[in-house]
Amino acid sequence: MKRAGALYPVEHDAETRLLLSCVQLDQCDDALSPAAQLRTDDLADLDWIRLNRLAAEHAVQPHLYLRLKRLDALPPSALNPMRAQYYASSLSNLKLARELLRLTARLSDAGVPALAFKGPVLAVKLHNDVSLRQFNDLDLLVRPEDAGRAAQVLIAENHLPRHFDPTDVARSLTRCNEDEFIRPHDSQMVDLHWALGPHYFPYGPPAELVWDRAVRCTIEGGEILTMGPIDTVLFLAAHGTKHGWSILGAVSDLAGALSADDRIDHDQLLDEAARFGCLNMLLLGAALARNLLGAVIPSAIIDRIVKQPDIDALALSVERRMFKYLGVRPGLYLDWFVSLRLLEDHRSRLRYLVNRAFLPAPEDVEFIELPPSLYPLYFPLRPFRLLFQHGKRLFVEVPMGRKRVKRMPS
């Protein structure tokens, strides 16, 4: 498949090529190219189950269904499961959007400002349609001093924390930057954040600036506080890098954010990306969007990519790997080394490795519970826990864990 601006064509299998053509951002509504040119024999040879799973794990299943439903030659046995999943997902997204309004109102009543990001807010900002982005939870940012009250509100709404201890808020805040609050009867999940990134990954826009530049977004008849346009782009660049750009949905989100608001000053965007340590992250995400989706990238960003040939080489390396991991965890190259390669100096790389390898996280407490007096032992124990749980990924593929992929409802 020919992709606009791609410097290094990568050969993908038929299912991946079709998926990419359905997600491309520059296609007309009434045309599918090259999907529209597929012959009946081509469609018959496709592995539709694999294609559907690929779209789900890459968080782009709505785009796949809406594009393919226009093809007369598509077999009903392939289209019907996609249709069912699309409408189930649309209903789930609508319920989550309304739940977001309800919970932010509850927090506001308790005197806790909350900023929503990702999830339904990003769907509306990028697509003007809450059904056109795949998600299954809500993300809320509160200020650290409000985290304890926010947790109490969520607990009163029957969302129970996975790790957060409302009786020891200070310790909960220092151990991580977020926690999952899960409602037991339907597993609805709210990710409550008091910082935008984990301690080992202090890149992207700082939360204080995000609060200062927050904007209002209308969703389902209500107003939600969310990130401004520049902060949305910077956050998506850092977030995609933190996860190694392992899913196509992250690339699509960044491409959409770059084009969603024509008032973005791209020189300011690049300056702030450099200032907050995520310039290379932004350039890699933009290169992937150009190569994979044919996205139109602002000339100021393209000029920076051209001056850094290592970015194009890394984009090629990521693209070769990102569709290999159907049903399994991404390899350590995407999970660890993409972030490492994008950091701009040896000190940042060393800090990233040391902090990620040794700073205790809630998962370490889940792995082995020690009394509070022995908490310092988690520092030397963490690398052994990582090696025990993830070391096999150096040699074999490991089944996908719950946290890695947000699937559409089946």
Image (cartoon, rainbow, N blue to C red):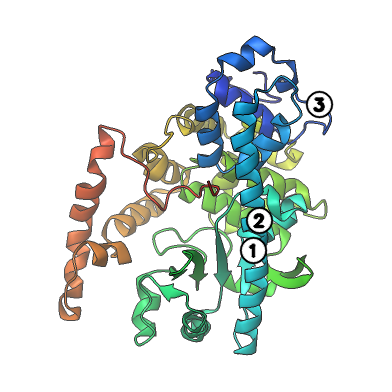
Report the amino acid beneath label 3: Ala
Residue 333 place in picture, x, y as percent: 38, 37
Whether 202 is drawn above or below 333: the answer is below
Instruction: Return the disc, 3 or 2, that comes first in the chain's sequence.
Output: 3
The 10 Å Cα crowd at callout 2, few under 14, some 14 to 19, many 20 or more, is some
Residue 211 place in picture, x, y as percent: 64, 73
The quadrant of the picture occupied by the N terminus is top right
Report the amino acid beneath label 1: Lys
The 10 Å Cα crowd at callout 3, few under 14, some 14 to 19, many 20 or more, is few
* Circles 1 and 2: CB atoms closer than 8 Å: yes
> Which residue shows up at 59% across the image and 62% down it?
205
Q: Quadrant of residue 312?
A: top right
Residue 91, disc: 2
Report the amino acid beneath label 2: Leu
Q: Quadrant of residue 298?
A: top right
> Which residue shows up at 63% across the image and 70% down it?
100
Q: Is residue 274 left or right of residue 69?
A: left
Which element carries disc 2, helix, strand or loop? helix
Which one is nearer the viewer's eye here, 287 or 300? 287
Mark 1 sits on what residue? 95
Instruction: Return the disc, 3 or 1, that comes first in the chain's sequence.
Output: 3
Residue 194 place in picture, x, y as percent: 50, 73
Mark 3 sits on what residue? 31
Q: Quadrant of residue 276?
A: bottom right
Whether 299 is drawn above or below 281: the answer is above
Q: Is residue 327 left or right of residue 105?
A: left
